[in-house]
Amino acid sequence: MRGDFVNPILVWYNQQKRDLPWRHTKDPYKIWVSEIMLQQTRVEAVKSYYQRFLETLPDIPALAGCPDDLLLKLWEGLGYYSRVRNMKKAALTMMETYGGSFPTSYDKIRSLPGIGDYTAGAISSIAFSLREAAVDGNVMRVMARLENSREDILKASEKRRVAQKLKAVMEAVPPDQDFRPGDFNQALIELGALICVPNSQPLCQRCPLKELCISHREGTTDAVPVRLKKTGRKKEERTVLLVRDGDKTAITRRPDTGLLAGLYEFPNLAGRLDEETVLGEVRSQGLIPLRIKKIRGARHIFSHVEWEMSGYEIRVAPAEANGDWIFADQHQIEKTYAIPSAFSAYAELLSVRTGKKGKKS
Ligand code: ADE
């Protein structure tokens, strides 16, 4: 592929780029935090998480030593919690293997837990100015339109092909030219986020690449890129229980493995259950129910499963806490326990503020 789009896109980026907090640093740790957060979450939502995360955990040793509950609290509402668990694993690896700092080669960065081709490329190029590609969904869309490619951009082989091309384009830039690989990668991401946006909305008139773009020339930007993968998501019904004793509500910790591992939730059971079954469950925890009423339903979409939730509020007589269920008031929940966004409709009923929802659409 020819590299004639390199200069126009860099000129555009220098003039039009957003002023984002992670664009003021070359610290690989901070770049890493931003890139992991940005993988599934909108830029606007990431800003406040990013700032709080770095204030609390300013470097690799702090992350490596962070207790899991605090870590999950810092991530609460961002979703895909395995991302932050893997970050802690990677931080521990860096403590053991690299003296507590980031390795400086692409391959070593790529082999850390939770770091894939995209993130390794982003960190290598932005923090260390290495000529490595960072190909995310934005970049795939820009490149598919530029080349008018009808290949499925969700295919791993297609991502690899584009990454190889972009790496070759970067390597072809003469070594004496002032060229910042991190700016180049971020320029492609930025163009996809601001101008070459999905569906039928691209702002081609403002695009620095419009003269070079084959989709624009041929009028095919509605049909390109092609995205074929199906979600294959299954639906599950769940019944959520707000079990209340005075101003306290029962929460419970999820298992250490699987969906939302280690996070806290309101007790909930598979299926759409009737009052009798729910009361039986409450009694089986050694509690005495006083009143029960039906409350709102809610839906939450994860990547592989969708929950359709129904709910009950159950008032119980004061009792000693049982092993599984923790009774906590609004303040304790907000401060200490990470409740995933799946339960935010129920947290709102208790006026409990949980992390904001910031998932990309
Ligand atoms: N999305 C992924 N990485 C990004 C970055 N560095 N800037 C803006 N949006 C991004």
Image: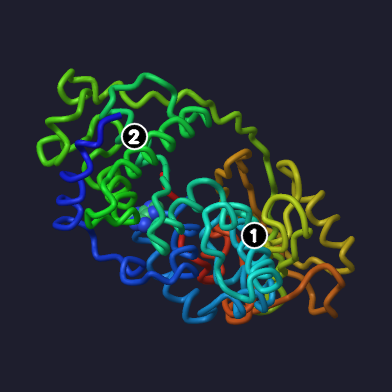
Q: Residue at x 14, y 33 (%)?
A: 210
Horizontal arrangement in the rendering, residue 39 relative to residue 211 (left or right) = right
Label 1 sits on what residue type? Asn
Snapshot quadrant of residue 217: top left
Q: Nearer the viewer, residue 163 or 309?
A: 163
Provide the secondary structure element on which disc 2 rests. Answer: helix
- Residues 135 and 220: in front is 135
For residue 123, side relative to residue 89 (left or right): left
Which quadrant of the figure shows ligand 1?
Answer: bottom left
Q: Report the residue marked by disc 1.
A: 86
Residue 119 position, x and y percent, is: 49, 52
Work out whether residue 55 or residue 358 is closer to the camera in this orientation and state it.
55
Which label sits on residue 284? none
Residue at 62% over, 38% down: 304
Report the amino acid beneath label 2: Arg
197 lies above or below 108? above
Q: Is residue 120 above or below residue 325?
A: above
Q: Position of residue 284 (x, y in %)?
A: 89, 61
What is the count of numbered marks?
2
Q: Look at the image and tell me whether residue 42 can be seen.
A: no
Q: Could you say where residue 330 lies in the image, as x and y percent from the top left?
A: 59, 77
In the picture, the quarter occupied by the N terminus is top left
Q: Residues within 10 Å of mark 2 (few under 14, many from 20)?
A: many
Q: Which numbered disc covers residue 141?
A: 2
> Which is more N-terminal, label 2 or label 1?
1
Are dots 1 and 2 in contact, CB under 8 Å?
no
Quadrant (top left/top right/bottom left/bottom right) for the C terminus: top left
